[in-house]
Image: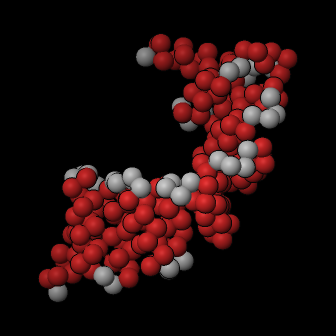
Amino acid sequence: MRKVILLSTLLMLGACTSVSDTKSVDNTSCVSLHEKGDYDNAIDCFTLLIEQDKKDYRTYVRRGGSYHRKGDFEKAIADYTNAITLEPNKAATYIVRGMAYSDNKKYSLAVSDFTQAIKLDPNNANAYFERGVVWGLWGQFDDAIEDFSKSIRFGLNNAEVYGIRGATYFDKGEIDKARNDFNQALKLDPNNEFAIQAIARLEERDKK
């Protein structure tokens, strides 16, 4: 436990280094702060790295990620946009900016970013999944189901995807397909609370 506290303290000192001593700041320290949930100091740390090298798009993405986790979506979007300006051909950056747009309820912009990510990487499962989520929020269930299905086909084969596709089938009134997806979610994760509750609701529905 003391070793953990010591390590945390050392990383914190690195994050708080003055601009004149930026040589002591490195990406590993900044990422470590982010992973610990210390987003304010992670942001300060990434800012020092950006001052060292304003052309490394990855640092903007990482600082954007810390802003994103803090809930400061506008600053996250600004950093992701800077990253895209520097390196416009990375699908992953469009995905994270799309997620920030979605979290900020700017759904049209989110769909545009996910679609651009798919153009850059047509087999990107995460892009299809995130775009499917937005389609579902808009009530465009067929488009959502198509995107969830593609995300599964391209490797995002987990309980969450089956659960949310099942919920979309349910909203569309296709109960048997919904049940199949909830059961598949439970096969992949027997403790998945969403799928457990969904199956229970369907069983109650069948009794009526």
Taking the image as drawn, is residue 78 in sight?
yes
Taking the spot 53% from the left edge, 58% from the top edge, the residue there is: 122
Question: Residue 57 at x, y = what percent?
Answer: 73, 39
Taking the image as drawn, is residue 137 in sight?
no
Taking the spot 56% from the left edge, 20% from the top edge, the residue there is: 8
Identify the image quadrant of residue 61: top right
162, above or below 190, in the image: below
Quarter of the picture holding the N terminus: top left
In this picture, residue 153 sits left or right of residue 176: right
Question: Residue 105 at x, y = what percent?
Answer: 63, 67
76, above or below 37, in the image: below
1, above or below 205, in the image: above
Residue 188 vs residue 29, the one in the foreground: 188
Q: What is the tally of numbered marks visible in this picture?
A: 0
In this picture, residue 115 sits left or right of residue 162: right
Identify the image quadrant of residue 163: bottom left
Which of the colour schemes (rainbow, by chain, secondary structure, one colour) is used? Answer: secondary structure
Residue 45 vs residue 79, the one in the foreground: 79
Q: Residue furthest toward the left?
A: 207
Taking the spot 72% from the left edge, 14% from the top edge, the residue there is: 24
